Image (spheres, rainbow, N blue to C red):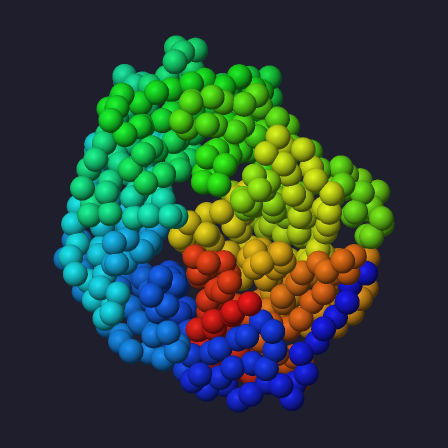
Amino acid sequence: MIKKLVVAASLYCVLASGVVYSQIPKVTLSEAIEEPRVGLSKLLLLKNGTTMYFHFPEQGGIATAVYDQNYRKTASVQNQIKSFPLSKMHDGMFEGIFEINGQVVAFFTHVDHRVPTLYRFVFEEQTGKILHEDVVTSAPQIPKKAGYGILGRIEEPAFLIEKDPLSGYYAVATLNEYPHEINQRIKITHYSPMHEVINEGYITTPTDKFRYMNLKTMTVHGDEFVLAGTSIHNPAVYGSRDKEFSVIVSQLTKGNKVISNQLLASRKAFVPPEIVAKFNPSRNLVFMMSVVNDGRTIYLNTVDPYSSKISDSKWIQHPGLTNYSIYHLGDDKPYRGTIQDFYLHEDGSATMMYEEMVVSQGGGANAYYVTRMGGMGISRISDKGEELPGSYFLAKNQYTSSEQLPLLMYRRAKGCLDNKGNGGFDSYDFIQAGNHAYFIYNDLKENIDTDSVQITRGRAMVAVSGTNTVLAWKEGEEIKRIYLFGDPGKADISRFSNLAINAHASDGKSYATLLIERNGSNKKAYIAWVKF
């Protein structure tokens, strides 16, 4: 049953600096800011309680704003950069933004004369000003005839950055599939919080069976280790389900400059897998998920980074989730959700976050994509990969004018930003606060105000401008929902948020987002802080 807890309009105050909603969770708004219409934006919640807001325009410098612990803006600056022309900002790729050693560090890739270069921009937390910018590393020049290789599914040279969530240590991987020698294609560099290189090595393949390597994931734990997952395959694996791929588990360990590599069992799939690895410090285990078949088939391996022991692969299934959708929504087919992310608990279990995703293509020579992003499936598994009791389903029905891929929520949480579709208003976000798992998404008012959504999945959300942000959670056997930013009352008012910009506090008890309020043809933007 879906139970609505609609926040009364009388509880909603006039939007202004420091406004607080009279509800739980507590919501506080900034003064109105300019809505970012082009470029990329990101929020970051710092350990000292302040908030930094970044905007990376398609042209121009990097705009920053700083808000104190009381959510008041204390500084703002338009940073000019020297590493490359400001007019070339739109040609680059934003790789991630992190708090490291009391400073904020952003990584940005720019390609000049076919040479990809990774830049590091270091910002002062108090003022938002750039303290310094430098080159981290460059990849070899992309060959002029690279197009032939790319059509053969060779990836362009690129970089992958991963930071330890518990410290300032991080790793940078340089990926380059063009060298003839396969064991010179992936280099991992381990950095200290002072940006000093503490270890470095190349991933090598334990077999000559496969020709191509593609690093998919890394996880970092202090100065102790960097653990990586790499798919290896042959070109023929694309387009044929009876071809093989495999996964290399690699580890760069403190005091050892040679990366150790172990090969998992080969599998068959249409394309090589996406891989995600996360370290659970309470169990000293790495959860490594290999995702194939459009995100609907997942294999779990647990890795002990101290003994190098790897568990047998476990196929993750969720019959309880299927039973829930059949019983509560009248479905007559097994639930087929795509994995978007997973959350590790201290007891060693993991919450798996799924979403119905169907990609359609049209337009012939002028191809375009539409992705239906449907119901959210939630399932908790043990460290052995077995589904635990309590799986459930939250209905929604969204369409976005782009091709969306599995693990969207995972990429957003890492700070990897893109310009796809409607700019980050689709899909959903997840926050674990105490014993409750909360889900944040945008939906139409008529869907929020009716119980029939549990059967029909509601009217489709095609455009975000008429939606409101929903907070939903399961309590007992009931699914409860509220308007996170107040019941709009009138049909021509809506309040929705950009989920790609969301920033989560390290204690898991709050997050910040960019709220857009539309009143008729007028729109205003605010930073909203949500505290549970």
Q: Is residue 480 shown above or below 370?
A: below
The picture places residue 309, in percent across and down from the top left corner, at 47, 21
Q: Please tell me which residue is depicted at 17% across the width and 54% down the height of the picture.
A: 133
| Viewer-nearest residue: 246 or 389 | 389
| Viewer-nearest residue: 459 or 226 | 226
**Side of 422 where 452 appears, left or right:** right
Q: Please tell me which residue is depicted at 56% across the width and 59% down the height of the picture.
A: 433
Q: Please tell me which residue is depicted at 46% across the width and 58% down the height of the picture.
A: 507
The picture places residue 228, in percent across and down from the top left corner, at 39, 31
**Side of 276 where 255 appears, left or right:** left
Q: Is residue 180 shown above or below 26?
A: above
Q: Please tell me which residue is depicted at 80% across the width and 66% down the height of the picture.
A: 451
Q: Is residue 210 in view from this perspective?
A: yes
* Numbered marks: total: 0
The picture places residue 514, in percent across and down from the top left corner, at 46, 69
- Residue 430 location, quadrant: bottom right
| Viewer-nearest residue: 71 or 114 | 71
Quarter of the image with the C terminus is: bottom right
Q: Is residue 121 shown above or below 9?
A: above
Q: Is residue 185 in view from this perspective?
A: no
Residue at the extreme top of the image, as rendered: 208
**Side of 364 where 46 appears, left or right:** left
| Viewer-nearest residue: 216 or 20 | 20
Quarter of the image with the N terminus is: bottom right
